[in-house]
């Protein structure tokens, strides 16, 4: 489903981003202007490279930090929290997920060897669980683009220079696309686009799947969990969980 958004709605979105980027800009300036030696972390490396590479301007650096924080923390942690909540509500899914990863361990010559790429590619059901979790709780509320010219879709015209917000969840949660769309059912699978599409697909799409699959592998093979307090799922507009989900983890004994 596609909506045309007027400039005033885009203004509210941009203002929220400006508050965060202003804070990050001040932090970056303070770090780069400090004569002290820091931890040699990402921001230190960015400060060093900004003096060597012409394309690494201060503006670019701020957006790089902003994108990195969202891609590597906010989105991953939200998806994992939702996955824990769904698995707790659907023990049959957790059972099959665990069986798939136990089989990976049994097929190894050395059970303690690290996870391999071939093992990751064999995680058919795990990837279906990840896909179904993303379908129900796609972290990004929409994909923003701008119309370079008048665009006519199904009798509606989106004027030139309007912002376009593609809302994937309007399709993923539609009964026309999925039977019982609010039901968590990893045994079904359809092609979808949780990471965008085309030339501007998220660069971290495959990384995110690998990260989630690896985390689930370690979780189901080494730990068991008990939910102390369930999550209250909401959108505002990013996926959120109220005061969080409280889980007790215990290491499995062999």
Image (spheres, helix red, strand yellow):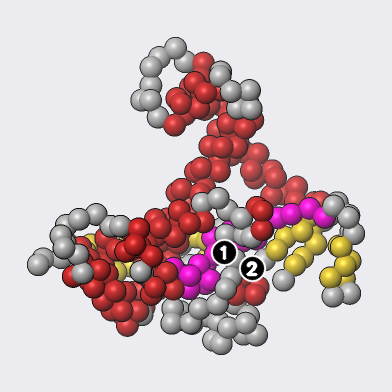
Report crowding for label 1: few under 14, some 14 to 19, many 20 or more residues within 10 A (C-alpha).
Answer: many
**Left or right for 12, reference 69:** right
The tally of labels here is 2
Residue 111 locus on image (x, y percent) = 16, 61
Question: Residue, x 46% and y 48% (percent of image)?
Answer: 72
Q: Residue 9 appears at what percent x and percent y?
A: 76, 54
Q: Give the x, y percent position of residue 102.
A: 22, 71
Q: State which tag comes first along the sequence, 2 or 1.
A: 2
181 with respect to 166 (left or right): left
**Between 124 and 94, which is closer to the camera in this rendering?**
124
Name the outermost residue toward the bottom.
179
List the residue tagged with mark 2. Answer: 168
Name the residue: 81% across, 51% down: 7
Is residue 148 in view from this perspective? yes
Does residue 85 show up?
Answer: no
Q: Do residues under tags 2 and 1 come within 8 Å of each other at their CB atoms?
A: yes
Specify the segment rendered in magenta.
130-147
Relative to 117, 79 lies left or right: right
Q: CA distance from mark 2 to mark 1?
A: 7 Å
| Mark 1 element type | loop
Give the vertical position of 210 relative to 181 (above or below).
above
For disc 1, the marked residue is 194
Q: Is residue 233 above or below residue 143?
A: below
Q: Nearest the camera: 53 or 226? A: 53
Question: In the picture, residue 81 is in which quadrant?
Answer: bottom left
> Toward the viewer: 116 or 60?
116
Residue 131 part of the magenta segment: yes
């Amino acid at each position: 489903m596609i909506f045309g958004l007027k400039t005033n709605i885009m203004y509210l979105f941009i203002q929220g981003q400006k508050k965060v980027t202003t804070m990050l800009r001040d932090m970056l300036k303070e770090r780069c202007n400090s004569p002290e030696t820091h931890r040699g972390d990402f921001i230190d490396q960015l400060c060093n490279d900004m003096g060597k590479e012409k394309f690494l301007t201060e503006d670019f650096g701020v957006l790089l930090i902003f994108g990195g924080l969202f891609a590597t923390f906010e989105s991953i942690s939200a998806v994992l929290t939702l996955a824990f909540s769904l698995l707790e509500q659907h023990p049959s899914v957790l059972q099959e997920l665990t069986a798939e990863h136990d089989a990976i361990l049994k097929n190894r010559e050395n059970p303690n060897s690290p996870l391999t790429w071939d093992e990751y590619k064999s995680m058919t059901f795990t990837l279906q669980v990840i896909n179904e979790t993303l379908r129900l709780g796609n972290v990004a509320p929409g994909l923003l683009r701008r119309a370079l010219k008048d665009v006519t879709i199904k009798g509606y015209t989106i004027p030139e220079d309007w912002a376009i917000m593609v809302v994937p969840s309007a399709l993923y949660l539609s009964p026309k696309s999925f039977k019982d769309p609010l039901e968590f059912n990893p045994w079904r699978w359809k092609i979808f686009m949780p990471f965008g599409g085309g030339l501007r697909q998220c660069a971290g799409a495959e990384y995110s799947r690998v990260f989630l699959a690896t985390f689930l592998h370690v979780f189901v093979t080494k730990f068991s969990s008990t939910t102390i307090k369930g999550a209250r799922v909401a959108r505002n507009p990013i996926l959120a969980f109220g005061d969080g989900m409280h889980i007790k983890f215990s290491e499995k004994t062999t």
